[in-house]
Amino acid sequence: MLGFNTENIEQVCLELAEIQKFCKNEFGTTDIFSGSKFYEMIIANQLNHEMIPGQSGTKDGKDHKGEYEYKHFKEQSSNHSWTFNDYTDATIDSLKKVVSAIFAHIDTDFTPPKFDWYIEVEGKICSSYLKHKTETLLKTKPKGKVNARKMINISPNQIELDLGLKKTYTKEPNKSGKYYETILKISSIQKKLEKMTGVDQILTGDKIFEVLVASKLEHTVFSEQKKHDAHDEFGNLYEYKNSKSYTWNFQDISDAVLKKYEDDKAIILTVVDKINYRIKEIWSAEPSHTIPRLKEKLEEKRERRKKKDGSAIRRLSVSLSKGDLNKIKAKKIFPN
């Protein structure tokens, strides 16, 4: 059973919507609560940078010297390293054009989260370093099994030892920074939501939308990162996929992940309004119908790539579209 009042949650989400609209109008930044945008705002504020609007493929901050790349990890995370999710040649080469890459550490036990230290690496040096690291990775991994997703993790010790750099410690929060007041408002709402729901880091990723969906379905969202997203009062497990449109992304459909889906009672596909924080539609599909379609689409993707240039696909990711809803026998369960 739900341990919070749904109406209260939705009321607080109206406050989030107002902040989202303010950030769009004032800073040109949309989806401030998606991905890492909030933490990029904290970094930019502390360093007196200006945020660069956009998501994947754009740099993160800028000042009179030029543009910057931000990477961060949280003290509370199990992974104390910085992740590059896509280390293609183009990605690495693009770092030559930035002033520097900021490798930041953030402690979320503070309100607002504390950006307490970072390592700054000149853009050209960072590009060269990552190129060397990825080439080494390719040589040391078994042929045909190397890091298919093109991911690499860099730790603080690696950067300090390999490049002879030291951490720069920040002092007090930059209260005169451009984004400070907005950061305070967001942090206050985050704490309020976490207290109401018992869900930590609720503004990370799609957690807030998972909570809103769970409230409609009388599910409970796992408060910490788990293999599954939610469960009901009978112990049944569920996988949630949220989308602004009718395109649901499955980022890693390895055999292990597909096997995990078999344990779910249903795959929940939702259409959400990320500006106004509303759930527009909820569809439910059985794993026995969804998994074969995911495998089929992955094989189609492999065949297209093979015909195009003979290479293997880098990421085991596919999307389900509105047209797939019939194919996986999905049922619309909200609104009724």
Image (cartoon, rainbow, N blue to C red):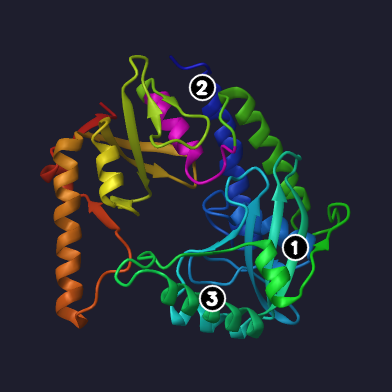
Q: Going 59% across and 84% down the picture, which residue do you hit?
A: 128
Looking at the image, is 232 positioned above or below residue 288? Answer: above
Q: Secondary structure at mark 3?
A: helix
* Residue 29, horizontal then vertical, whole percent: 58, 60
Sort mark 3 into few (<14), some (14-19) or many (20+) by Cα contacts within 10 Å. some
Q: Is residue 29 left or right of residue 241?
A: right
The outermost residue toward the right is 171
Tag 2 residue: 7
Q: Going 29% across and 29% down the picture, which residue do you hit?
A: 335
Tag 1 residue: 118
Instruction: Report the amino acid beneath label 1.
Output: Tyr
Q: Which mark is residue 133?
A: 3
Q: Which mark is residue 286?
A: none
Q: Range of the magenta residues? A: 201-216
202 falls in the magenta region: yes
CA distance for labels 3 and 2? 50 Å
* Residue 238, horizontal then vertical, whole percent: 33, 31
